[in-house]
């Protein structure tokens, strides 16, 4: 069986699965249950200097698909609402009782060096194996000058990261907010400030729904709602992109990544690791199904690695990174055409109407004498866009077949129709 | 899966409570959560096979999508647009050979989307909502139409004609409107007086006057109707039960199955309807199954359904046959009754065993006898020809052209009394709807001349 032990920014872990700093890591009782279930580590719910914050009711809203499955959660909960010394005592106890597990202390503070350093030192003294700077909380705390209010300003990301580095001799994780235009800006700032790793993404500003009876956003607190932080499987594509952007930036090659964002299954985790993440953090999936989901995350990841011949996570870490490129590096001479297997086609017509209404009118219907319908692709019209394959409800019925056109790879910068093409003489093919 | 009845053992009768349970809903209605879950199974096909399998061409993916978006009233309106009796069809259609039989999810999951139950969910929401009638009427045309027969075809015609701006008088021989919806379907398919609730809903459009107790050839006459109205629509159905024409048919205890079904529908206390201990039902259609099942509901210890041809030729769908077998009804095929015997009251039925010889039904020479104290005959219905003099026939039914006009100009016909599609409620509703549209177009074209 593959070995899931890993090292994330200098922190050794029995597996890459940590719980993210969030409601599931608020108290000893929760984290203990998580450790018992098999989680490798937990980033404790964010603490700050006393007095603790006060939370409101209700706190969560959800976005569902038409099967009723929750795709994303939005929350307006603030950081830990318990006194700092209670949190520190529980961290200390757990570190003693679960020596092979990781606890990372998450902290935030206003822009005051003393406050950042004081809490960081207290967390270090409680025994945490690393410190995570919460620079991402997008609701409430930012209105008090914390969380994303700092994370959205590069100089402040760098400054707070440096303060924590100066205060403690522990691995430092700077947690980034996705509520910015270019993730590389805060990532580079964290790197400059001395972060060992970045954790991303924090939640995304969101209103998940509007209650049309009460005419207010959900969750509704009395008569009103506020934007909250969005998380869950719906945000995974955004997180994958931001992780990839950092992972493939040569200037950030020694900045490790603790990936967060909609990770629900072992394959989600494997995708982030393939892009270069050292480990992953999970919250929403645990909130929806309980800590037991880590069972299959461990088992599934191990089996995948066994099947692929990967002995350790390092054997495939970053393997997909080189294949994430700018659009300009794509091969424009590569071509595929859809092919419909009429034997497995159930004649639902979804491919036809999708192509006919919204794509390239490339799928033909022939109706037989018995009323049965035969769907075929007109190669002359098919641009290989893939829409039909995605809407087809039958796995394997529509296949995208590579067109062997014998043409060499060609990128847009080299393309004859590109008016800004570099001098053909200087293009290396 | 299917309904399972409380059955009597060793001749012990059922309590009125057991009987009431047996007549309860065949399929309990879906609640909102179950409907949403079921709706999410629909693939939202384009030019969907289910839709093409429905004689009224209801936009099935469209209405199921609306259930999924929590717009049940919009779904109901979409259904009723094409089929004003969508509520009855949802309950009584043999969906297994229509929409659900064509559902592509059969191929991916082995079981179709429950289209009938979803349709019922949507239509029930609309009928239960205290809202105005969902269809408006076109500006008054000043034209009057007569409809003979207040069954599905007649009422569908009346509703569509009212929508198109005409005033309609509907004449019905029986005390209540609804036709077979009221008198001919098993009680467990139409619980809670649904047929009458649907009639009341349908009449809510306005412009339709119902005259019950008026029989063609007795109380009303074709010549008078033709003179007084701009158009006449005959939706007579098949009012007469076909006879077996075997000795002993006049014995007490022998009756037609539709009469039995009708009596049960009209009786508030089902346990007041007499049933035999050994019941033989003769026939192979869904009416035969409805009668056999309900004899069982009442507590008949033994019920045998005898059909003169093989299982493949039976009119009852495979699903209906399974329902009967599941509830202990013996189905004997290749059994043709040759005599009903008894001393005043039926005691036994004598059958000849049959087979197909060169495609023709023939007796093998072998016979057998089933003891019986009640015989229910369900060998089909026939059109009653009273009052139809001068109209061209098409076999045992009325001849009509492509626009549903009979051989007499201005007299139209539809539903079971013409030869088009199967003798199903859904087909009758489609006939009524289409005939009203054609009649309207003809009258407007004439008005322009």
Image (spheres, coloured by chain):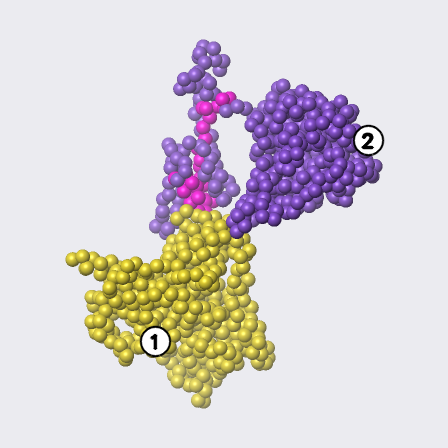
Q: Chain of mark 1?
A: B
Of residue B169 and residue B326, the one placed in the foreground of this image is: B169
> Which shade is chain B?
yellow
Tell me residue A398's x, y (percent): 47, 39
Q: Are marks 2 and 1 on the same chain?
A: no
> In the image, what residue occupies the spot 41% across and 42% down?
A353
Badge 2: residue crowd in 10 Å (few <14, some 14–19, many ≥20): few
User: Label 2: which residue?
Assistant: A125
| Residue shown at 47% from the left, 48% from the top | B43
Viewer-closest of B165 and A253: B165
Range shown magenta: A328-356
Chain A hue? purple
Q: In the rendered image, which residue does mark 1 sit on? A: B212
Disc 2: which chain? Answer: A
The answer to which image quadrant residue B247 occupies is bottom left
Q: Position of residue A328 (x, y in %)?
A: 49, 22
Residue B155 showing in the rendered view: yes
- Helix, strand or loop status at disc 1: strand
Q: Is residue B367 left or right of residue A302?
A: left
Left or right: A299 as drawn, with respect to B428: right
Residue B10 percent location from the top left of the image:
59, 79
């Amino acid at each position: 069986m593959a070995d899931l032990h890993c090292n994330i920014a200098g922190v050794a872990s029995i597996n890459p699965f940590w719980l993210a700093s969030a409601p599931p890591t608020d108290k000893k009782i929760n984290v203990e249950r998580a450790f018992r279930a098999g989680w490798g580590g937990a980033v404790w719910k964010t603490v700050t200097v006393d007095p603790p914050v006060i939370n409101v009711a209700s706190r969560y809203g959800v976005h569902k698909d038409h099967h009723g499955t929750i795709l994303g959660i939005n929350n307006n909960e603030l950081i830990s609402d318990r006194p700092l010394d209670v949190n520190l005592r529980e961290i200390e106890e757990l570190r003693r009782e679960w020596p092979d597990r990781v606890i990372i202390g998450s902290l935030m503070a206003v822009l005051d060096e003393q406050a950042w350093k004081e809490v960081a030192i207290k967390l270090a003294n409680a025994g945490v194996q690393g410190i995570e700077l919460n620079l991402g909380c997008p609701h409430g705390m930012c209105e008090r000058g914390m969380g994303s209010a700092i994370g959205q300003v590069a100089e402040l990301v760098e400054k707070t990261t440096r303060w924590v580095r100066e205060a403690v001799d522990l691995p430092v994780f700077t947690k980034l907010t996705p509520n910015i235009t270019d993730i590389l800006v805060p990532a580079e700032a964290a790197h400059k400030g001395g972060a060992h790793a970045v954790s991303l993404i924090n939640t995304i500003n969101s209103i998940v729904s509007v209650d049309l009876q009460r005419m207010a956003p959900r969750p509704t607190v009395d008569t009103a709602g506020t934007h909250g932080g969005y998380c869950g499987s719906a945000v995974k594509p955004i997180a994958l992109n931001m992780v990839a952007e950092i992972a493939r930036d040569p200037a950030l090659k020694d900045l490790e990544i603790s990936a967060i964002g909609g990770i629900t299954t072992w394959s989600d985790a494997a995708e982030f690791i393939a892009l270069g993440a050292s480990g992953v953090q999970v919250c929403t999936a645990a909130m929806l199904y309980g800590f037991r989901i880590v069972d299959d995350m461990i088992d599934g990841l191990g089996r995948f690695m066994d099947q692929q011949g990967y002995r350790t996570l390092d054997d495939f870490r970053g393997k997909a990174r080189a294949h994430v490129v700018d659009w300009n590096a794509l091969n424009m001479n590569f071509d595929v055409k859809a092919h419909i297997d009429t034997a497995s086609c159930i004649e639902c017509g979804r491919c036809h109407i999708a192509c006919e209404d919204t794509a390239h009118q490339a799928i033909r219907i022939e109706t037989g004498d018995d009323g049965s319908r035969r769907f075929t692709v007109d190669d002359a019209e098919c641009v290989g866009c893939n829409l039909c394959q995605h809407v087809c409800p039958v796995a394997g019925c529509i296949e995208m077949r590579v067109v062997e056109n014998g043409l060499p790879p060609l990128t847009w910068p080299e393309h004859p129709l590109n008016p800004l093409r570099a001098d053909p003489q200087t293009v290396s093919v | 899966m299917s309904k399972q009845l409380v059955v009597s053992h060793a001749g012990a009768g059922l309590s009125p409570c057991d009987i009431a349970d047996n007549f309860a809903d065949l399929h309990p209605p879906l609640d909102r959560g179950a409907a949403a879950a079921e709706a999410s199974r629909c693939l939202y096909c384009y030019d969907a096979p289910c839709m093409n399998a429905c004689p009224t061409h209801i936009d099935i993916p469209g209405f199921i999508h609306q259930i999924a978006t929590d717009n049940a009233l919009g779904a109901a309106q979409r259904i009723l647009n094409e089929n004003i009796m969508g509520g009855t069809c949802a309950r009584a259609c043999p969906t297994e050979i229509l929409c659900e039989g064509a559902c592509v999810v059969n191929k991916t999951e082995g079981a179709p989307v429950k289209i009938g139950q979803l349709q019922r969910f949507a239509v029930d929401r609309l009928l239960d909502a205290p809202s105005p009638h969902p269809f408006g009427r076109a500006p008054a045309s000043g034209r009057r139409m007569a409809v003979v027969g207040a069954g599905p075809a007649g009422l569908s015609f009346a509703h569509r004609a009212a929508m198109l701006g005409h005033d309609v008088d509907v004449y019905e021989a029986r005390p209540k409107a609804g036709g077979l919806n009221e008198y001919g379907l098993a009680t467990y398919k139409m619980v809670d007086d649904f047929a009458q609730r649907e009639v009341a809903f349908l009449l809510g459009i306005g412009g339709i006057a119902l005259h019950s107790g008026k029989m063609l050839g007795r109380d009303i006459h074709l010549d008078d109707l033709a003179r007084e109205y701009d158009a006449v629509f005959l939706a007579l159905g098949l009012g007469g039960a076909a006879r077996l024409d075997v000795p002993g048919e006049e014995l007490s205890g022998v009756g037609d199955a539709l009469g039995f079904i009708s009596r049960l529908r009209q009786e508030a206390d089902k346990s007041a309807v007499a049933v035999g201990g050994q019941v033989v039902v003769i026939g192979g259609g869904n009416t035969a199954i409805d009668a056999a099942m309900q004899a069982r509901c009442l507590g008949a210890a033994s019920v045998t359904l005898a059909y003169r041809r093989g299982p493949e030729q039976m009119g009852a769908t495979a699903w209906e046959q399974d329902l009967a077998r599941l509830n202990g009804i013996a189905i004997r095929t290749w059994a043709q009754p040759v005599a009903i015997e008894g001393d005043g009251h039926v005691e036994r039925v004598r059958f000849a065993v049959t087979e197909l010889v060169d495609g023709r039904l023939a007796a093998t020479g072998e016979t057998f006898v089933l003891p019986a104290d009640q015989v229910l005959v369900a060998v089909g219905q026939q059109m009653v020809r009273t009052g139809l003099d001068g109209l061209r026939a098409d076999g045992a039914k009325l001849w009509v052209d492509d626009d549903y006009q009979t051989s007499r100009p201005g007299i139209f016909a539809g539903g079971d009394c013409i030869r088009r599609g199967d003798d199903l409620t859904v087909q009758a509703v489609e006939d009524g709807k289409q005939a009203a549209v054609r009649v309207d177009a003809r009258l407007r074209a004439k008005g322009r001349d």
